[in-house]
Image (tube, rainbow, N blue to C red):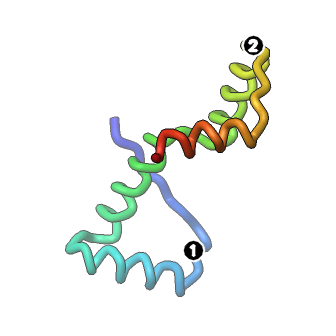
Amino acid sequence: MPRSITIRDVPDETGRELAARAAATGRSLQEYLRAHLIDLADRADPDVLVARLRTRKDALGTRLPADKILAYRDTDRR
């Protein structure tokens, strides 16, 4: 079931800017914000992602120096 969310204390300038962006895309402010909230929820949380990467790195026990990582990256770009 859909949920209603209220956001208080949004600065006037922020509200005007968001309304202008919504209008520029032909959507209401509610439609515009809903789309952005859905997109935000679909993305991985950066803190959770970093924690997963650290756990995986610790489990594998590998420690590749940054210069080697960059060298491998650059090799693929040639």
**In the figure, residue 68 lies in which quadrant?**
top right
Quarter of the picture containing the N terminus is top left
Which of the pair 66/5 is nearer the observer? 66
* Residue pointed to by mark 1: 10
* Residue pointed to by mark 2: 59
Which of the pair 37/8 is nearer the observer? 37
Amino acid beneath label 1 = Val
At mark 2, the secondary structure is helix
Q: Residue 27 placed where, x, y %?
A: 24, 70
Classify 10 Å Cα crowding around label 2: few (below 14), some (14-19), many (20 and above).
Answer: few
Q: Is residue 63 left or right of residue 28?
A: right
Whether 27 is drawn above or below 61: the answer is: below
> On residue 35, which mark appears?
none
Q: Is residue 11 left or right of residue 67?
A: left
Q: Residue at x 57, y 41 (%)?
A: 73
Of badges 2 and 1, the one in the foreground is 2
Q: Residue 71 placed where, x, y %?
A: 64, 41
Q: Is residue 42 left or right of residue 14?
A: left
Q: Residue at x 67, y 26 (%)?
A: 52
